[in-house]
Image (cartoon, grey):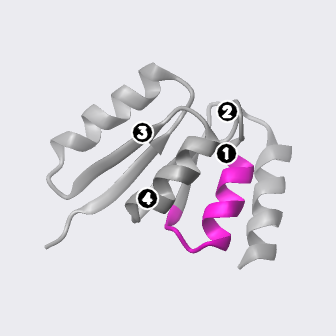
């Protein structure tokens, strides 16, 4: 069985490293890259053909919303949005954007 290829995109070193460690314990997952902003996540998604991108919403350079839009439009993998922010507007904006892309 092939491993599920994952990219972790978060501007926090602590979060990225923690998720990478947690996923490395499970033999079903392979972390193929970590990104500290949306631009790096998009570049990794184009290079690595990951199955899933764990995406933070608020990051520098390119935020997770714009990176998600690009990744979904290019069919570069599934997105799982992660955020510590409790802002309904961000989630609603993201859902509207994804609906228009699909």
- Please check the rendered image and state whether residue 68 is part of the magenta-colored stretch, yes or no: yes
- Please check the rendered image and state whether residue 15 is part of the magenta-colored stretch, yes or no: no
- CB under 8 Å between discs 1 and 4: no
Mark 1, secondary structure of its residue: helix
Which residue: 62% across, 31% down?
84
Q: Position of residue 95 (x, y in %)?
A: 76, 62
Quadrant of the image occupied by residue 21: top left
Mark 3, secondary structure of its residue: strand
Q: Earlier in the sequence, mark 2 or mark 3?
A: 3
Mark 4, secondary structure of its residue: helix
Marks 2/3: CA–CA distance: 13 Å
- Stretch in magenta: 64-78
Q: Main secondary structure of the magenta part?
A: helix
Q: Earlier in the sequence, mark 1 or mark 4?
A: 4
Q: Is residue 75 left or right of residue 28?
A: right
Q: Quadrant of the C terminus?
A: bottom right
Q: From the image, tell me which residue sits under label 2.
A: 59
Q: Residue furthest top?
A: 14
Q: From the image, tell me which residue sits under label 3.
A: 34
Residue 64: mark? 1
Q: Quadrant of the N terminus?
A: bottom left
Q: Earlier in the sequence, mark 4 or mark 2?
A: 4
Q: Is residue 82 left or right of residue 97?
A: left
Tag 2: Cα neighbours inside 10 Å, few (<14), some, or many (≥20)? some
Q: From the image, tell me which residue sits under label 4.
A: 47
Q: Position of residue 88 (x, y in %)?
A: 81, 44
- CB under 8 Å between discs 2 and 1: yes
């Amino acid at each position: 069985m092939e491993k599920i290829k994952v990219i972790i995109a978060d501007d926090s070193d602590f979060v990225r490293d923690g998720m990478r460690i947690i996923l490395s314990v499970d033999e079903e997952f392979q972390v193929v890259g970590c990104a500290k902003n949306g631009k790096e996540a998009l570049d990794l998604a184009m290079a690595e053909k990951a199955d899933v991108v764990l995406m933070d919403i608020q990051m520098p350079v390119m935020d997770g919303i714009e990176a998600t839009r690009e990744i979904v439009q290019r069919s570069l993998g599934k997105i799982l949005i992660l955020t510590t922010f409790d802002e309904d507007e961000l989630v609603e904006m993201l859902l509207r954007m994804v609906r228009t892309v699909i």
